[in-house]
Amino acid sequence: MLNIGIIGTGFMTVQHLKAYRGISGARVAALCNPSGRHLDGDFSQVAGNVGDKEPLRLDMTQVKAFRDPAALFADPDIHAVDICTPTRTHVDLSLAALAAGKHVLLEKPMARTPADARRIADAAEAAARRGVFLMPAMCIRFWPEYAWVRERVISGVYGRVLDARFRRVASAPAWGHGHFLQGGESGGALMDLHIHDVDFIQHCFGRPHSVMASGYSKVSGAVDHVVALFGYPGGPTVSAEGSWAMADGFGFNMAFTVNFEKATVDYDLSRGADAFRVAEAGTVRTVSLSEPDGYAGELRHFVESISLGKAPDRVSARDAATALEIAAAEEESVKTGRPVTLG
């Protein structure tokens, strides 16, 4: 049994707690929050922008409560830590956890800057040589509709991709105790929300040659709305939009359209049961997938990999660092109005 300690007690922790309930071979053995908030297990007032909205009350009778992460790292009964804290804390917490011999699941973005992300990736690769593993929580790689379309991209069953468009837009986040709206810490929507699509784009098509982006700040002081074009010489044409700039009440939506030579695959969360469609050979069909959401998928992969004594292979710390490099190039392009070439 893999005993997991979760650091942080906000919205993402709630999604992870719910996901762990359906994963065999793991149990949440500890919670940690320096403020003490929600260490009684009552998460009924914690909400976010996606996922199951069911209020959560965790039975703490078999769960340890910590206010000091160092004490959690020192506990020999804890095998892995799940870091769901503000981005500014990720470097110190992940490096300390790896040094203590704990496996790490680290929420995105992995860090605020590419340099810090590379520090974590370097430490993760060194730890892996000792059999200690870190996995960034890039849940969209595991989201059923996204995983489905990537399989078709890689297999070529619909021919080559002509163009792909991704969209992830929302009202400004009203949770997180203000962290998200401090752009110097969170990176705004570009780094915190849009990073999902940046990572998925590189997952499907590799590292782009260049990026050209336009955007603006609205709520955080950083880039809160971005539209980016990713350069792939010879194709496909790939673009993505990310935003926290929608009006209050808009909520959250994620969508993509991938246009192949022989089919068009279209996903739009706002369509509900009709969200996922495939058009080919003159017909349009709705695709229904039974897999759990990306939170459950990523945590299951993490637990199963650690239990087998191997590094998670669906996403690496180096992948997360590369995604941050691409996002930082977008940020530069927004500021300068010019395309940025990626090394």
Image: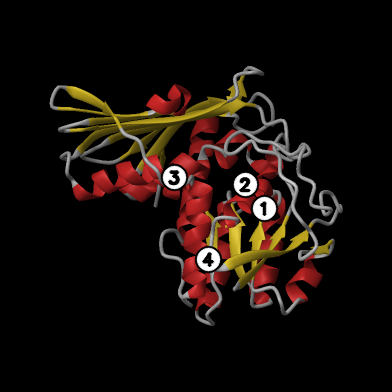
Q: Verify CB contact (< 8 Å) between mark 3 and mark 2.
A: no
Name the residue type under label 1: Cys
The residues bearing labels 3 and 2 have C-alpha atoms spaced at a distance of 14 Å
Helix, strand or loop under label 1? loop
Q: Amino acid at mark 2?
A: Gln
The answer to whether the residue labelled 4 contacts the one labelled 3, judged by CB atoms less than 8 Å apart, is no
Q: Residue at x 16, y 33 (%)?
A: 261
Q: Residue 74 location, x and y as percent?
A: 76, 76
Q: Secondary structure at mark 3?
A: loop
Residue 312 x, y percent position in the rendering: 46, 66
Q: CA distance from mark 2 to mark 4?
A: 16 Å
Q: CA distance from mark 4 to mark 3?
A: 17 Å
**Relative to the observer, which residue lies in front, 146 or 230?**
146
How many circles with numbers are drawn on the protein? Answer: 4
- Dot 4: few (<14), some (14–19), or many (≥20) neighbours within 10 Å? many
Q: Nearer the viewer, mark 1 or mark 2?
A: 2
Q: Which mark is residue 84?
A: 1
Point out the image quarter for the N terminus.
Answer: bottom right
Quick check: can you spot residue 52?
A: yes
Q: Residue at label 4?
A: 303
Residue type at numbered disc 3: Trp
Dot 1 alpha-carbon crowd within 10 angstroms: few under 14, some 14 to 19, many 20 or more: many
Q: Is residue 223 left or right of residue 93?
A: left
Which residue has dot 3 on it?
Answer: 143
Please say if 58 is above or below 269. Answer: below
State the SS at label 4.
Answer: helix
- In the rendered structure, which disc, 4 or 3, sits on the residue that comes first in sequence? 3
Viewer-proximal residue among 149 and 52: 52
